[in-house]
Image: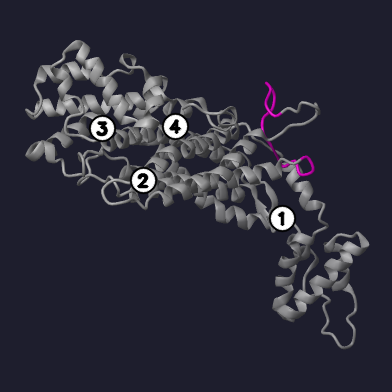
Amino acid sequence: MSAAVFERFLSTPELLDVFDERAVLQAMLDFEAALVRAQAAEGLVPAPAAEVIAGACRVERIDAGAVVAASGRAGSLAIPLVKALTGAVAQDDPDAAGYVHWGSTSQDVIDTALVMSVRRALALIDRDVGTLVASLLALAERHGDAPMLGRTLMQPAQVVSFGFKAVAWIAPLVRGQERLRRAGAAALQLQLGGAVGTLAVMGERGEAVARRVAAALRLPLPPGAWHTQRDELASLACEVGVLTGTLGKIARDVSLMAQGEVGELAEPSGGGRGGSSAMPHKRNPVASMVALSNALRVPHRVAALLAAMVQEHERGIGNWQAELAEWASLLASAHGAAKALADVAGALHVDAARMRAHIDALQGLVFAEAVSMRLAGRIGKARAHALLEQWSQQAVREGRHLRDVTADALHADAPPADPPLRGIVADDELAALFDPARAAARAIVVSAPRLASLRERARALDASPPWAAWLPATEH
């Protein structure tokens, strides 16, 4: 994939290689080889001619740059490719050249090549999301019980645990990975229909040829051509977009928690990662930055793919072509985000002491609701809420801990018009209401079974990766 420098910066070499012009053209040639061999097996093409054609279906036999350059004028990448392939075959056997691309159409070869390319891209995304999930589960295992602030509307709310926080990252990742696999299984199918989708040229042998081509390319065989039925591909694009949004959410949280003033998390540094050209002290969360940048770009790609569904009759004009162009960028962004976070998640530094310090620095205010609810059973919810609001304001005004302000109020004599407060909460019970570990206990109870379930689901996903065979050769 030829990409501008800023595109390469946000994506990965592996993903860009998937959509490199030579890789895409080779996928198209793989389709042509599978097609002619299937036709020979069904007696539609002489076997010797089929082998000559299949033998020529190597990208080294054509001028890839010239094919790409001619595609805009031709209106299709397939037209100059078929012309170049026919010329290569003619050099070996002029008679065999007449059987090149026989009974097929441009959209058949391009869509099938797209599907095979997307399959390779999804293998990379699936691999790195799995790595990210495993790393986050390990972090939760090590630091899950650590009390930390839960924040709503960017403000401290209540005490939770780091494991509770991790669930909010891991659960949508696992669900996203599961949905992506289902959507991929539905969308990544052979395209073979001929001029208008009826396989008319191949007649009664057409279905048998399609079965053979699908088997050779290891693709599911659809009930028929889906030239302008783009629903499954659009659904897959939406799932890619949703998954990238989840990656962006994680990156947003990590980047906020990694701010110097917060310091609850830190991405790994060293070796040129996260430095500043002007400020030697900085430790920039660059993985989060890459994931956030990609999450920002993806919704527009998904929107374009949804818009491209509105295709005319049996072959779209402009919309199908726009769809093809969007897929590479969509998947480049998705993999860029997944790989960036996967590369650092295992080395994220979790500072439990800093998390506890932020709880302590709030003078007990995050425990106000717990105290209010405890008092509500004795003096009513409305009065309890009003008192805690009053005492919280006093704690802030006087720079005191809410626990101490509350204790003083509970030991004081009540005004004549008010029901007495003395003795309604014992001192040890009041101290427990302000204990961060106790406050985090509920979050731990809630998150523990969810983490266990997510761990099992992640193991199941890891045990059966559907596209692992299409990972780079060194990995399978």
Give, as a three-letter code, the residue at label 4: Leu
* Residue at disc 2, secondary structure: helix
**Between disc 1 and disc 2, whose residue precedes?**
1
Q: Earlier in the sequence, mark 2 or mark 4?
A: 4
Left or right: residue 435 versus residue 181 is right
Task: Kindly report which numbered mark, 1 or 2, lies closer to the viewer in this rendering.
Answer: 2
Calculate the distance from the C-alpha at mark 1 to the C-alpha at mark 2: 37 Å
Q: Secondary structure at mark 4?
A: helix
Element assignment for label 1 = loop
Magenta segment: does it hold 214?
A: no
* Residue 218 circle label: 3
Read off the residue under disc 4. 124
User: What separation in Å lies between label 3 and label 4 (alpha carbons)?
Assistant: 18 Å
Asked if the residue at tag 2 contacts the one at tag 3, i.e. Cβ–Cβ closer than 8 Å, the answer is no
Sooner in the amino-acid sequence: mark 4 or mark 1 = 4
Residue at image location 57% in from the left, 36% down from the top: 341
| Figure quadrant of residue 101 | top left
Disc 1 marks which amino acid?
Met
Residue ID at (46%, 27%): 1
453 or 64: nearer the viewer: 64
What residue sits right under mark 1 in the picture?
154
Please state the extent of the stretch shown in magenta in the rendering. 260-274
Q: In the image, is residue 60 above or below residue 266?
A: above
Q: Which mark is residue 233?
A: 2
User: Quarter of the image holding residue 275?
Assistant: top right
